[in-house]
Image: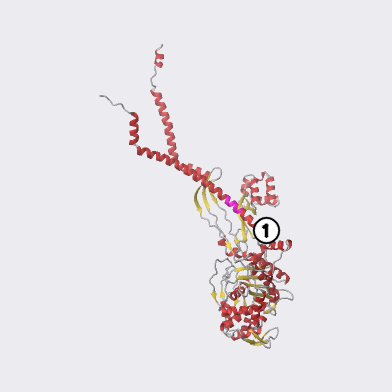
């Protein structure tokens, strides 16, 4: 054995090697710890940032405009989410988007547009960053476009408003523009209430796109509110149908109808013709979009006579049993003439309304101070807003001046020289039905009746109501508004339309009334504007509409009809005063 | 001098007993860490579930809106009236022909 071999067989620690290994291992550990400390403690920001870039997302929820429904929950306006297709031309060009023209063909097909048009719109200005290709496409079409994977073509969420009832409630509900902003009717009036804003939230998403952590809310959203109207769509539909029929038969320029719940002041129906289809925006005409029931004021003609009677009874210048001489059927006031169709001779108060005598009512008006009459008109809501709060409402016109000629005082009593909207007139008749209490009108469904103001004493209101029952009975001016089973207290009216310098050949035919007269529930006004042809009297043109809509409405509201002998008795009790 | 034989396990136990609070605290720290991991896992699963449910809700809401439109167009009053009068030969009785049934 050599000396060297001997040394190897006898093992002893190689100190320098051991040290090397230990130092090396320690260095590895130390560098690991140092690196970890560096990442965790000294410079944590960068990796956090990298992680956040991959997982943090901002989500915003889509908010649909609030629903509008009638009092029974039938939908009048519903928003449905749709998509807008837009292009970013710069992105299209940068990514060589026109490489595969088959995809563009497919896109054009699904948008129902020629492919040349679509391509041209994108190529028009290659530097542009935004151009709409099509708005309001259905989600199905949107999903298809998404699958085409065209570079630079994107989808944006928007919503489309549908009006299931179409032209029946068109003017009342109004419409929104393409950007979902209300521009007409209730959509415009309650735009803020109906519009919600989306909330934006920062979230952390996992690899498969699910939200695993909600961080903070960037923008607090506002949820939209729904609108419940006081309208009863069953009545509204009936009203519109009858109104449309009358407009066609009499070739009227327009027609309006308002029905009010006597006990609460809620509007149950408000229809106008001609109407339009709010679901297609292509053919909107402003004259069809007017809510004439509250935007247009007419001279009310004889329909205000009951309120002259009420003013006379209220001030005590006549009593229910009084008789007014109207012979010889005309009277001369300040050089002008007021006349009736025939000489009715001595008339009871009820008969004045029953036969709609201009002379009789003028005599009553001349007996009281002008301020008394104007005061009664104004307290019944003439010349002021009804409280319904819809954009475009007219307040009508009652002149407030000190000097009135006698003739003007007389004309005021049979409905000339002042204008009212159909809604105001309906409200006045509702006041007769509620025993003299005037309620603010409401287009929103109310939980309880609002506080009304007493403007006529209960006796006077009931007395006038009783007198009006005769109008729709045999011999009255409104027999066509008669309803089987329900006594109607109504009044017809016909007024000539004023033109520059006097009165023209056009008429406004009105019928206003309350039913059932024994226990009033509904007040309604029908106004037919400029009927053409031989028939233009309120009782002939508007009366039948009144009768049909009122009888249908009372049936729908389950109002119990009176047995026919009781109706006759009620009418007879008025007949005693004739 | 006779040395007492050392009982190693006894010493170890004594030592453990002496440091009992340390060990307990150490254990608590470990348990706490596990609990944090566990709850954050639960929270993430639940959040993800919530997200799924909300998406489902939005989908159902959209479906509801579309069904609502369909229902409205099918139940439109003039359509019902037309079917009742034309196809089914029904008519509305006039108020005079109505019979009132009173519920006691």
Horizontal side of residue A201 vs A491, given as left or right = left
- Vertical relation: A437 (above or below) A1: below
Determine the main secondary structure of the stretch shown in magenta: helix
Residue at 38% x, 23% y: name it: A15
Residue B64, percent across and down? 61, 54
Report whether A197 appears left or right of A339: left
Q: Is A36 rendered above or below residue A281? A: above
- The answer to whether residue A22 is magenta is no
Quadrant of res A239: bottom right
Relative to the observer, which residue lies in front, B35 or A53? Answer: B35
Mark 1 element type: helix
Give percent across and percent down for residue A187: 60, 63
* Identity of the residue furthest to the left in this view: B1
Outermost residue on the top side: it is A1
**Relative to the observer, which residue lies in front, A223 or A122?**
A223
Q: Nearer the viewer, residue A37 or A575?
A: A575
Q: Which residues are magenta?
A: B56-62
| Residue drawn at the location 26% of the way across and 24% of the way down | B2
Q: Is residue A100 above or below residue A508?
A: above
Colouring mode (rainbow / by chain / secondary structure / one colour): secondary structure
Is residue A135 visible from the viewing direction of this image?
no
Q: Residue at x 67, y 59 (%)?
A: B73
> Circle 1 marks a residue in which chain?
B
The crowd level at tag 1 (other Cα within 10 Å; few <14, some 14-19, many 20+) is few
Residue A135: percent from the left, percent from the top?
A: 64, 54
Q: Residue at x 52, y 48 (%)?
A: A203
Q: Is residue A55 visible?
A: yes
* Count of marks overlaid on the render: 1
> What residue is disc 1 on?
B74
Quick one: quadrant of the C terminus of chain A?
bottom right
Q: Position of residue A8 (x, y in %)?
A: 41, 16
- Image-based side of A98 in relation to B4, left or right: right
């Amino acid at each position: 054995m050599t000396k060297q071999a001997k040394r190897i067989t006898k093992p002893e620690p190689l100190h320098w090697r051991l040290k090397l290994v230990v130092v090396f291992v320690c260095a590895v550990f130390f560098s690991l710890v140092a690196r970890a400390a560096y990442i965790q403690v000294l410079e944590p920001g960068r990796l956090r940032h990298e992680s956040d870039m991959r997982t943090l997302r901002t989500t915003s929820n889509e908010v649909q405009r609030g629903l509008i429904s009638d009092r029974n929950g039938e939908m009048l306006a519903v928003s449905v989410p749709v998509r807008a297709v837009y292009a970013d031309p710069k992105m299209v060009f940068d990514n060589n988007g026109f490489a595969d023209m088959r995809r563009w063909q497919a896109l054009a097909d699904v948008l129902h547009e020629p492919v040349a048009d679509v391509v041209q719109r994108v190529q028009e200005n290659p530097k542009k960053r935004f151009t709409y290709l099509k708005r309001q496409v259905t989600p199905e079409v949107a999903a298809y476009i998404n699958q085409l994977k065209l570079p630079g073509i994107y989808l944006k969420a928007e919503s489309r408003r549908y009006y299931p009832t179409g032209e029946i409630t068109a003017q009342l509900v109004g419409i929104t523009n393409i950007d979902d902003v209300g521009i007409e009717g209730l959509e415009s009036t309650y735009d803020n209430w109906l519009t919600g804003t989306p909330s934006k939230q920062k979230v952390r998403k996992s690899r498969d796109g699910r939200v695993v952590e909600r961080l903070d809310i960037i923008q607090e959203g506002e949820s939209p509110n729904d609108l419940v109207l006081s309208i009863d769509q069953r009545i509204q539909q009936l009203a519109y149908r009858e109104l449309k029929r009358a407009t066609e038969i009499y070739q009227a320029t327009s027609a309006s109808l308002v029905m009010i719940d006597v006990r609460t002041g809620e509007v149950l129906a408000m229809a106008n013709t001609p109407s339009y289809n709010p679901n297609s925006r292509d053919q909107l005409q402003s004259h069809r979009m007017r809510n004439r029931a509250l935007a247009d004021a007419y001279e009310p003609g004889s329909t205000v006579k009951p309120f002259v009677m009420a003013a006379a009874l209220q001030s005590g210048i006549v009593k229910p049993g009084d008789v007014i001489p109207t012979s010889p059927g005309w009277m001369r006031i300040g050089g002008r003439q007021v006349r009736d169709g025939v000489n009715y001779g001595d008339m009871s108060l009820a008969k004045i309304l029953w036969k709609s005598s201009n002379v009789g009512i003028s005599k009553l008006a001349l007996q009281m101070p002008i301020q008394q009459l104007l005061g009664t008109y104004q307290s019944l809501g003439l010349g002021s807003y009804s409280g319904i709060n819809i954009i475009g409402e007219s307040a009508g016109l009652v002149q407030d001046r000190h000097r009135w000629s006698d003739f003007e005082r007389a004309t005021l009593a049979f409905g000339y020289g002042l204008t009212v909207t159909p809604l105001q007139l309906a409200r006045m008749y509702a006041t007769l039905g509620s025993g003299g209490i005037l309620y603010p009108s409401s287009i929103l469904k109310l939980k309880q009746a609002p506080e009304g103001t007493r403007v006529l004493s209960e006796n006077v209101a009931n007395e006038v109501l009783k007198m009006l029952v005769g109008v729709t009975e045999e011999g009255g001016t409104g027999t066509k508004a008669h309803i089987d089973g329900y006594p109607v207290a109504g009044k017809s009216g016909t007024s000539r339309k004023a033109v520059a310098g006097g009165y023209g050949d056009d008429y406004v035919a009105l019928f206003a009334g309350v039913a059932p007269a024994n226990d009033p529930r509904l007040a309604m006004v029908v106004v037919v504007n400029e009927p053409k042809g031989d028939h233009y009297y309120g009782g002939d043109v508007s009366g039948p509409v009144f009768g049909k809509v009122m009888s249908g409405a009372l049936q729908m509201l389950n109002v119990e009809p009176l047995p026919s002998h009781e109706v006759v008795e009620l009418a007879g009790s008025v007949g005693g005063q004739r | 001098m006779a040395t007492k034989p050392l009982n190693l396990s006894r010493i170890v136990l004594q030592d453990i007993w002496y440091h009992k609070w340390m060990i307990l605290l150490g254990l608590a720290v470990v348990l706490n860490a596990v609990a944090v991991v566990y709850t954050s896992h639960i929270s993430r699963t639940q959040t993800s579930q919530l997200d799924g449910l909300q998406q489902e809700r939005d989908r159902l809401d959209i479906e509801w809106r579309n069904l609502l439109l369909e229902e409205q167009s099918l139940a439109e009053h003039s359509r019902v009236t037309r079917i009742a009068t034309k196809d089914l030969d029904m008519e509305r009785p006039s108020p005079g022909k109505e019979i009132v049934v009173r519920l006691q």
